[in-house]
Image (cartoon, rainbow, N blue to C red):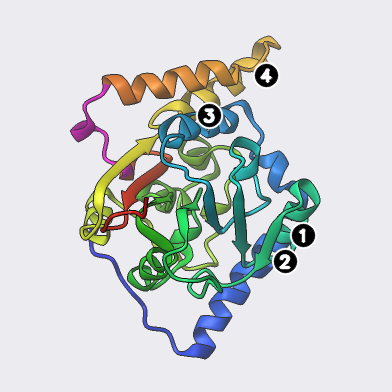
Amino acid sequence: MTNKIECVAEPATTGLKHLSRIARFYDSEIDGYDNGYSTPLCQAEDEVLVHLIQDMVGSKVVDAGCGTGDFLKYFQPTEYVGFDISHQMVKTAQQKYGGTFMVADMHHLSLPNDYFDTLVSFYGPMSYSLNPQALIQEFTRVVKPGGSLIVMPYTKRSGEAQKSSILEKKVLTGDYSTATNPNIEKVFYSTEMLKELFKGFADVRIVGINFAANGIEYADGILQSMLKKEPISAEFYRNYMLWELENIEEKNRPVEYARHALVTARKPGKSEP
């Protein structure tokens, strides 16, 4: 595994092709997207995420790569704007939640400087940027000094799944994952890569979520088919993943071996009273 972040300075036409490819893919996934991420394990991952970030989410939030808007299932900020490159994702988010959702390239947010309390980008959008330094600069621009960035890029584990057999993918990323489409170039991250990218920020924390739960899910699927048993509950997976976080030393759980990476950081400077 390499820890170097490869930044591709793309000509405008190539960049547009990359964005168009992402948009077409997510447009094509819309019919099965919410259902694919509604399993007990995925619900549990959401609950663990909320547990880890609930004290960092402010009243004004921008959501980059908002998908179908499910941030609003868990948080109700007084001001919220969601952006996504996929027209179908934005359309579905508006149907589900109303509010402000827009189609846009997350590298160019049509938002004022130093305005939002929090920027979130959940479950992978950041990895579609081939120039992550420029992306983080844009994310930082729209957040107040002292405000929070909460991002979840794809991990090296998802990169391995992209090259793996169907069975290996089940263990690494589950039955459904948009992370493993091999036709769209992405950046897959390790702990060291993320430390380098966020080295200018305050209160940086880099955490892996779900190191072994997909393996449990896969074994449980076999037992369900053999014994006609009920699937393991979201509560079990949530408690197991919280146990991982509380009982395995952080040095022994680098994010490249987790299903998800979570980075929380604060923009340097003091927030206004």
- Graded by Cα atoms within 10 Å as few (under 14), some (14 to 19) or many (20 or more), the crowding at tag 4 reads few
| Marks 4/2: CA–CA distance | 38 Å
Residue 184 disc label:
none
What amino acid type should be assigned to the residue bearing mark 3? Glu
Seen in the image, is 107 located left or right of residue 198? right
Camera-side residue of 223 and 102: 102
Q: Which residue is mark 3?
A: 47
Nearer the N terminus, badge 3 or badge 4?
3
Camera-side residue of 60 and 63: 60
What amino acid type should be assigned to the residue bearing mark 2? His
Nearer the N terminus, badge 1 or badge 3?
3
Residue at screen point 67% across, 19% down? 225
Nearer to us: label 4 or label 2: 2
CB-based contact (under 8 Å), mark 2 and mark 1: yes
Q: Quadrant of residue 186?
A: bottom left
Nearer the N terminus, badge 4 or badge 2?
2
Magenta-drawn segment? 248-255
Q: Which residue is mark 1?
A: 91
What amino acid type should be assigned to the residue bearing mark 1? Lys
Residue at screen point 34% across, 23% down? 244
Seen in the image, is 184 located left or right of residue 260? right
| Marks 3/4: CA–CA distance | 27 Å
Which SS class for mark 3?
A: helix
Whole-percent x and y of residue 124?
49, 53
What amino acid type should be assigned to the residue bearing mark 4? Ser
Residue at screen point 36% across, 69% down? 137
| Marks 3/2: CA–CA distance | 27 Å
Q: Which residue is mark 4?
A: 225
CB-based contact (under 8 Å), mark 4 and mark 2: no
Q: Which residue is mark 2?
A: 87
